Amino acid sequence: MKGRMWTKEEDQLLADTVLDYIRDGKTQLDAFAFLSKELGRTAGACAFRWNAVVRQLVMRDFKKAKKDSIMNELKKKRVASSHSLKSIMKDLYQVEEKREDMQYRVQKLENKVKEKEERLRQLATENQQLKEHCEAIELYNQVKERYAGILQLLESASGLKPEKESYADKDASDYFSSKPDESKTSVDTETDAQS
């Protein structure tokens, strides 16, 4: 079929198909490959006929198809960027919600830490008081032992036994829990101890 003449219908199909492909953002080569099957001609023959004859006949439509293709591409990009912008905004809202949630959790943990620190200070103070109390009891027991030793020396030296219960016979906890008789002075206490 070499050298076969192009008909008006073939030229019209070539023009319409190529322009449609261009508007849709496809290449002219794709249009020529499609037309080669439709027209029973080679893609090269279709390309040659397009460039040599048909394009000049439809130059205004060709330029409009190119512009339409560019506009369609821009619209697609705009829609894609609009979707991506919406997606970015949605992601930002989610990030902000997560940040607020994390900030709330951090505040809660900081409050717990403050409570634990306060409890630790209270326990440290209580511990210090207990140490001081233990030291006072230990000192009292040492004084009690010395006093008992002195009393034994006095008893063996004088051969007398005390009739009343002395402070040396009292337990340390009794001493710290009971109040001394406020009506007695320290002189009265010493007199009672000597008799």
Image (cartoon, rainbow, N blue to C red):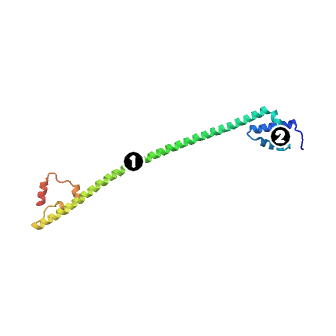
Q: Residue 65 shows which numbered tag? A: none
Q: Nearer the viewer, residue 70 or 188?
A: 70
Residue 169 in sight: no
Q: Position of residue 64 (x, y in %)?
A: 75, 33
Q: Local crowd at mark 1 within 10 Å, few (<14), some, or many (≥20)?
A: few
Q: What's under tag 1, amino acid-wise? A: Lys
| Quarter assignment of residue 175 | bottom left
Q: Quadrant of the N terminus?
A: top right
Q: Residue at x 78, y 37 (%)?
A: 19
- Where, by quadrant of the figure, is residue 22 drawn? top right
- Relative vertical location of residue 114 with respect to residue 19 in this rendering, above or below: below
* Furthest-front residue in this view: 52
**Residue pushed farthest left?**
158
Sequence order check, earlier mark of 1 and 2: 2
Return the residue nearer the eye: 61 or 139.
61
Q: Residue at x 68, y 36 (%)?
A: 74
Image point (36%, 50%), residue name: 119
As drawn, is 55 to the left or to the right of 77? right
Q: Which mark is residue 114?
A: 1
Q: Which residue is mark 2?
A: 48
Q: Is residue 171 left or right of residue 110?
A: left
Q: Secondary structure at mark 2?
A: helix
Q: Locate residue 80, reporting x and y percent.
A: 65, 40
Q: Is residue 8 left or right of residue 185?
A: right
